[in-house]
Image: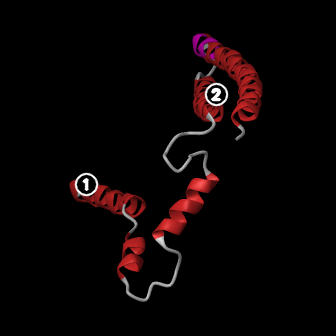
Amino acid sequence: MINFFKKTKILLIIIFFSFFIFDFSLSVKAWSDDFSGPTVDSVLESTRSQTSYEKDGNIINYPRIVGRFINVFLSLLGIIFVGLTIYAGFLWMTARGDEAGVTKAKDILEHAIIGIVIVVSSYVVTNFIINAFAKNYSTVTGY
């Protein structure tokens, strides 16, 4: 019986995520003869104009793209901090007065706080430098 529930759960997860991977509604609209919406070329052109790509595919603003990658990485480190904080709190609550468990939880929390201070300060420095380079880059290239 448990095996049946596991198979059902896996099947439901696959079906759920397949809707995000395969969007069938767009293909149905593209196949219909009376599709009066925007053309594929106009949608692609409007998307391209809202991004930092030229028509030949060259990226216009490199510093901003590098800054986005760095910001995503630092955001992931922030998520790790939250996880460590929750873990340290769990250890502390389940220590039940055991001095070794409380000390371990305090150490984890202390190191997590030191880590988040480093991450936030590196975010501030990175954001300042990327914005400075992006402004200089845009004045040189005209974008």
Q: Quadrant of residue 128?
A: top right
Q: Is residue 31 above or below residue 7?
A: below
Task: Identify the residue position indicated by label 1 in the image.
Answer: 2
Q: Identify which amino acid the numbered label 1 is placed on.
A: Ile
The x, y position of residue 123, in whole percent, is 71, 25
Q: Quadrant of residue 50?
A: bottom right
Counting residues from the start of the chain, the first of labels 1 and 2 encountered is: 1
Residue 97 appears left or right of 19: right
Quarter the C terminus occupies? top right
Within 10 Å of disc 1 (Cα), the crowding (few <14, some 14-19, many 20+) is few
Secondary structure, mark 2, is helix
Q: Specify the principal SS of the magenta part.
A: helix
The x, y position of residue 23, in whole percent, is 40, 66
Q: Residue at x 58, y 32 (%)?
A: 69
Q: Residue at x 59, y 21 (%)?
A: 95
Magenta stretch in the rendered image: 100-104
Q: Residue at x 56, y 47 (%)?
A: 54
Disc assigned to residue 85: 2
